[in-house]
Amino acid sequence: MLFKLLFPTENFCYFCKDDTPYLEGRLCRDCRDNYEPMHRGFLLRDDSIERVYASVFYNSFARELVHQFKFNDKSYLYEPIAHMMHMTIIEESLTDFDLIVPVPIHWRKEAIRGYNQSLLLAEELSRRTGIPVDKKSLVKSSWTKEQNRLTKYQREENLKGSFSIKDGASMSGRRILLIDDIYTTGNTLKSCASQLKKAGAKEVTGLVFATMNG
Ligand SMILES: [Zn+2]
């Protein structure tokens, strides 16, 4: 009871702020009903990354949730998003990994935003699975524009050469679960995976929160 008085927000939905006892992953039932769950993988035609798993379809609710998370300073929304991604891990038995690696953002963008959204998701998934996070080896070395404002061709050009492996870091023999919030063209995951493979990774699998694919 004292705990409840001290922390009165514990029954609030993190998205709509409604007070409800029926929270799951910090979201109320009404908000959760807006999800179109996927929890499945799809194949990529790519040498570096064979398969990507997605938790939900990128509908208007998922878009708004991610937008609030990334651009409106609501870093606490990592909890409901990671909750859905953890459900994908459980349903698809994605347990056979040595490392969780978040897609990095440029240090300047992280300084402006205050956090890397993929790292917050990766750290929560690590807490839930026990698989360690490597947040240092893969880096975003050049400043790129927001991908969602560019055409497909511009996106590919924009990403070329923008990810790299830190000097001296090795991914030798590692099976890696690569984490991002949204999957659109796949170029981000492919660029990251090719760097991880060059550094010796045995296998790279993607896990994203939302996608329009499939
Ligand atoms: Zn709600």
Image: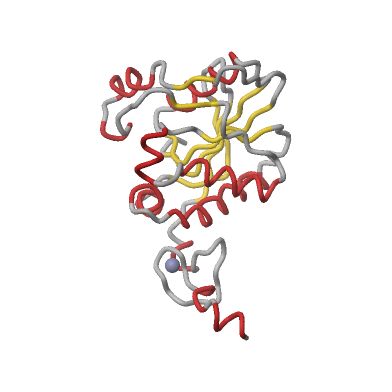
Residue at point 35%, 49% (across, down): 67
Q: Quadrant of ligand 1?
A: bottom left
Percent position of residue 134, x then y: 62, 33
Side of 110 where 135 appears, left or right: right
Residue at point 71%, 32% (across, down): 98
Residue at point 50%, 44% (across, down): 209
Judge whether 146 appears above or below 85 on screen: above
Side of 165 where 187 appears, left or right: left
Percent position of residue 16, x then y: 39, 67
| Residue that protrudes farthest toward the bottom in the picture | 1
Percent position of residue 58, x then y: 41, 45
Residue at point 49%, 47% (across, down): 56
Judge whether 96 appears above or below 123 on screen: above
Q: Which of 123 and 51 is in front in this view?
A: 123
Percent position of residue 106, x then y: 41, 31
Q: Nearer the viewer, residue 16 or 103?
A: 103
Side of 29 where 72 appears, left or right: left
